[in-house]
C-alpha cells in the first residue's frame, strides 16, 4: 500500500464527516496536483478513519457514561436506591474513611433537606464534628437531634455521644466512656485466647450505653460465635432493640450465618419490621439462602414500590426467569415492567428479552430491551436486532438497534444497513458507528463514500 502525505490528512470531525456525506465524490481533476502518493484514496480513508476513532473515542466514552448515568437515575426512580440513599451512603463512607470535614458537609446537607434519614444524618454530623474537636458544634448538633427527633431510635446514641463529648471537653460526667480503641483490642485478644470470657463482655458492650463503632465491632465478633447467647443477642438487635444501622448489620449477619433456624428468624423479622432498609436486607437474606418463593411473594404482593423493586432485582440475581416472565406479562405499569425487564436481562433470559424487543407495544420498553440485547451479545441476539430494524418504524427504536449492533463489533451488519438506509439521520448514525470499526467491510464502505 502506498504511503500518504501527513500534511494533507485532517482529523475527521462530525462536521467534516457530514460534509463528506453531503458531497460523496471528490474531483479527480485535482489528483495530478496532489500526486499519486497523496491521492491513494484507500490510504487516506484508513488514516482518516483511524484519526476519527482516536478523536471520537473520548466523546463516545462520555456518551456511554451519560447513558449509564441516565439509566442509573431511571432505575433509582423506579425503586432502586433513591438519591437520598446514595447521598447517605456516600456520607457514611466519609465517616469510615475518617474524612470528617467532608462528612460534616454531606450530613449537614441531608439534615437540612429533611431527607428520609435526617435523624441519622444529624447524629453522624455531631459525631464527625466531635472527631474534628469542634465540641461546641457537636453538642449543638446533638441538641438538634434531641429536639427535632425526640422519638427517634438515634436518641440513645445521641445521648451517649453527648456524654463522651462533654468528657473530652473537660466537663465532669457520670459515665466513664473509656478508650474505644483499647476496648476493641482487648475484645479481640479475649476472643482469640479466651472466647468464653469474651462473650459476656461483648453482650455487655451491645446492651450498654456506648459508641456505635464499638457496638458494630462487638456485633461482628459475636457473629463469628455459635454460642446460643451470641445468637440470641444478634437476634435481639435485629428485632430493633438498637439503632437502625446496627439492626441492619444484625440482619446481614443472620442471613450469612447458615444457622438451622435462620429462615424462621428472617421471616419473623420481615413481618414485624417497619424500617424499609431492614426489610430490604431481609429480602437479600432470603435470596442469599436461595428461598425463591419468599422473594417471589414479596415481588407479587408487597405494597411498597421500593421493596417490590428490590424483590424483582433479587429474582433476577437468582435466575428466576420463568417467574419474572409471568410477572412481566401480568404487570400493567410501565415503570414496574422496566424493572422486571432489567432483571430478565440480568438473569440471562435472552429469548424473553428478544420477545419484548420484538412484540412490546411501548416504544420505551422496546428501546430498553434492544439495548439489553446489544449488551448480552450472541449471534441470535444480533439476528434478532437485524429483524427488528427491518420491521421497526419508530426512529428512536431503530437508533437503539444501531447502538446495540455496534456493541457486537459486526461491521458487515452495519454496512448492510447503511447501504439500504434512506433516512439521512439514521445513515449518518450508521456511518458514525462504522468509523469506529476496524473491519475491512467498514473501511471499504467509507472508501466508497469518498469516491
Image (tube, rainbow, N blue to C red):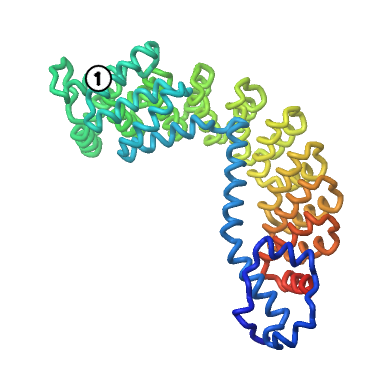
Determine crowd level at label 1: few under 14, some 14-19, many 20+ residues with C-alpha closer than 10 A.
many
Identify the residue at image location x=39%, y=11%.
151
Identify the residue at image location x=62%, y=22%.
302
Identify the residue at image location x=67%, y=61%.
14
Confirm whether residue 194 shows in the render: no
Q: How many marks?
A: 1
Residue, disc 1 = 162
Lateral position of residue 298 relative to residue 30, left or right: left
Name the secondary structure under disc 1.
helix
- The residue nearer to you, when weighing 139 against 196, is 139
Residue 438 horizontal/vertical position (percent): 67, 70
- The residue nearer to you, when weighing 218 against 158, is 158
Q: Quadrant of the N terminus?
A: bottom right
Q: Quadrant of residue 309?
A: top right
Confirm whether residue 162 shows in the render: yes
Residue 22 horizontal/vertical position (percent): 79, 64
Lateral position of residue 288 relative to residue 316, left or right: left
Identify the residue at image location x=25%, y=28%.
130
Residue 134 horizontal/vertical position (percent): 23, 28
Q: Quadrant of the C terminus?
A: bottom right
Residue 240 horizontal/vertical position (percent): 41, 18
Q: Quadrant of residue 89?
A: top left
Question: From the viewer's perspective, is residue 170 above or below residue 191?
Answer: above
Question: From the viewer's perspective, is residue 4 above or below residue 221?
Answer: below
- The residue nearer to you, when weighing 308 against 252, is 308
Amino acid at each position: 500500500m502506498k504511503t500518504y502525505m501527513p500534511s494533507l490528512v485532517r482529523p475527521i470531525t462530525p462536521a467534516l464527516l457530514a460534509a463528506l456525506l453531503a458531497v460523496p465524490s471528490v474531483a479527480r481533476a485535482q489528483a495530478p496536483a496532489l500526486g499519486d502518493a497523496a491521492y491513494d484514496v484507500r490510504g487516506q480513508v484508513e488514516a482518516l478513519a483511524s484519526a476519527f476513532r482516536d478523536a471520537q473515542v473520548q466523546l463516545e466514552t462520555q456518551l456511554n457514561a451519560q447513558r449509564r448515568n441516565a439509566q442509573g437515575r431511571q432505575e433509582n426512580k423506579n425503586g432502586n436506591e433513591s438519591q437520598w440513599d446514595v447521598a447517605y451512603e456516600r456520607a457514611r463512607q466519609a465517616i469510615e474513611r475518617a474524612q470528617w470535614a467532608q462528612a460534616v458537609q454531606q450530613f449537614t446537607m441531608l439534615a437540612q433537606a429533611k431527607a428520609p434519614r435526617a435523624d441519622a444524618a444529624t447524629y453522624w454530623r455531631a459525631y464527625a464534628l466531635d472527631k474534628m474537636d469542634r465540641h461546641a458544634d457537636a453538642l449543638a448538633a446533638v441538641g438538634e437531634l434531641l429536639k427535632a427527633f425526640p422519638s427517634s431510635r438515634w436518641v440513645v446514641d445521641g445521648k451517649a455521644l453527648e456524654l463522651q463529648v462533654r468528657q473530652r471537653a473537660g466537663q465532669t460526667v457520670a459515665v466513664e466512656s473509656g478508650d474505644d480503641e483499647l476496648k476493641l483490642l482487648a475484645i479481640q485478644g479475649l476472643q482469640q485466647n479466651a472466647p468464653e470470657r469474651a462473650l459476656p463482655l461483648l453482650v455487655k458492650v451491645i446492651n450498654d450505653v456506648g459508641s456505635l463503632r464499638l457496638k458494630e465491632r462487638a456485633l461482628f465478633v459475636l457473629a463469628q460465635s455459635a454460642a446460643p447467647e451470641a445468637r440470641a443477642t444478634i437476634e435481639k438487635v435485629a428485632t430493633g432493640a438498637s439503632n437502625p444501622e446496627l439492626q441492619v448489620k444484625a440482619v446481614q449477619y443472620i442471613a450469612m450465618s447458615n444457622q438451622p433456624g435462620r429462615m424462621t428468624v428472617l421471616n419473623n423479622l420481615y413481618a414485624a419490621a417497619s424500617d424499609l432498609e431492614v426489610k430490604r436486607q431481609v429480602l437479600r437474606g432470603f435470596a442469599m439462602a436461595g428461598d425463591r418463593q419468599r422473594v417471589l411473594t414479596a415481588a407479587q404482593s408487597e405494597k411498597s414500590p421500593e421493596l417490590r423493586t428490590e424483590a424483582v432485582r433479587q429474582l433476577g440475581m437468582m435466575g428466576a426467569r420463568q417467574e419474572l416472565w409471568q410477572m412481566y406479562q401480568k404487570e400493567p405499569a410501565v415503570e414496574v415492567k422496566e424493572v422486571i425487564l432489567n432483571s430478565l436481562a440480568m438473569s440471562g433470559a435472552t429469548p424473553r428479552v428478544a420477545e419484548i424487543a420484538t412484540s412490546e407495544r411501548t416504544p420505551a420498553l422496546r428501546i430498553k430491551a434492544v439495548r439489553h440485547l446489544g449488551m448480552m451479545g450472541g449471534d441470535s441476539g444480533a439476528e434478532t436486532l437485524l429483524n427488528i430494524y427491518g420491521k421497526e418504524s419508530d426512529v428512536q427504536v431503530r437508533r437503539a438497534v444501531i447502538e446495540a449492533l455496534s456493541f457486537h463489533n459486526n461491521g458487515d451488519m452495519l454496512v448492510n444497513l447503511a447501504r439500504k438506509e434512506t433516512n439521512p439521520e439514521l445513515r449518518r448514525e450508521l456511518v458514525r458507528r462504522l468509523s469506529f470499526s476496524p473491519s475491512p467491510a467498514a473501511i471499504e464502505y467509507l472508501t466508497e463514500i469518498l469516491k
